[in-house]
Image: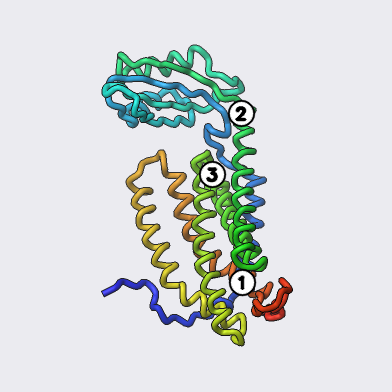
Amino acid sequence: MRMKLIPSDTKIDFFRIALLTLGASGLAMVTAVVLFFVMGLNYGIDFRGGTTIRTDSTVSVDVKAYRDALAPLGLGDVSITEVFDPTFRADEHVTQIRIEQQGDSESMTAQTIERVQTALKAVDPNMKFPSIESVGPKVSGELIETAIIAVLLSMAAVLVYVWLRFEWQFAVGAVASLVHDVILTIGLFSLLQIKFDLNIIAALLTIVGYSLNDTVVVFDRVRENLRKFKKMELKELLNLSINDTLSRTTMTSFTTLIALIALFVLGGDVIHGFVFAMIWGIVIGTYSSIFIASTLLLKLGVKRDWTKTDGSAGTQYANIDA
């Protein structure tokens, strides 16, 4: 007996509320942009600058103990990561502790560093500190620029990939849904003021990939049905294609969400932001692949006759009034 969240023979009209979904998504995107400019993002250490302290201990790392030792110092955002390397000795336990920039000074004062070292030595009196490095606002600004470029390049690559695999109308729909997902994710992080760091950039790129996968699955079925039902109205054909893949889409999203929710509940504070972005991305990505990408495809029309060399041939099937 196979488990099915959605029956395999659904006949849902996804375009009955097309204007409503497009309008709601457009309003949400505008709101997200306004939130970004008014409230801004709660940038983490990666984008604000700060000090990185590397520790070396012969005692197994207890991240909670380290965090509890540093908490009374009131240093703000502190990130503690255990470093693993096959070249380390069996009794060599290394961590990387990143502390946000204190005041206007690019580097942490000697007194503050001494307080941090004293607090950590309360956990392990023999702890050593091989290196202490500071990252200023200039480097942080470069990281922000690099992150933006990474997201934009990924979308450009998606545009080219979908254009070459399908037609330009498919590419426009796919990229529009990705832009929708990224903007709404940034807007949500701005609204909730969740820490925004390089982990969230990784989550954004993962969301782009996941949303694209959902969209391509639907578009593949659309292309198959375009060849199979040459005289079927585009709106009816798109509905058929989405219904054909709906069971697969919901099951994939559901099983992925189970794993992500488990990570969110049990994974600890360190990965909360990343997992939260992924959970939101799965939900909004599934929505956009159905209600954004496919609706725009319906508006633009598609090529129905591949025997013609004209790239625009067959686009007269666009449903302008849908």
As drawn, the label of residue 201 is 3
Q: Nearer the viewer, residue 227 or 156?
A: 227
Image coords of residue 53 (percent x, y): 45, 21
Image coords of residue 32 (percent x, y): 62, 53
- Numbered disc 3: secondary structure: helix
Q: Is residue 180 visible?
A: no
Image coords of residue 44 (percent x, y): 53, 35
**209 left or right, relative to 58:** right
> Residue at image x 71%, y 71%?
311
- Numbered disc 2: secondary structure: helix
> Where 58 sits versus 151, above or below?
above
Q: Which residue is mark 1?
A: 295
- Numbered disc 1: secondary structure: helix
Q: Nearer the viewer, residue 158 or 50?
A: 158
Amino acid under disc 3 = Ile
Amino acid under disc 1 = Thr
Q: How is the image coloured?
A: rainbow
Q: Residues within 10 Å of mark 1 (few under 14, many from 20)?
A: many
Give the quadrant of residue 314. Answer: bottom right
Task: Name which of mark 2 and mark 1 comes first in the sequence.
Answer: 2
**312 left or right, relative to 203:** right
Q: Residues within 10 Å of mark 3 (few under 14, many from 20)?
A: some
Q: Which residue is mark 2?
A: 139
Q: Is residue 142 visible?
A: yes
> Where 96 sits versus 111, above or below?
below
Give the quadrant of residue 8. Answer: bottom left
> Where 75 sits versus 121, above or below?
below
> Residue at image x 54%, y 79%?
225
Q: Which quadrant of the rendered structure holds the C terminus?
A: bottom right
Q: Residues within 10 Å of mark 2 (few under 14, many from 20)?
A: some
Q: Tell me the CA gap for discs 3 and 1.
A: 28 Å
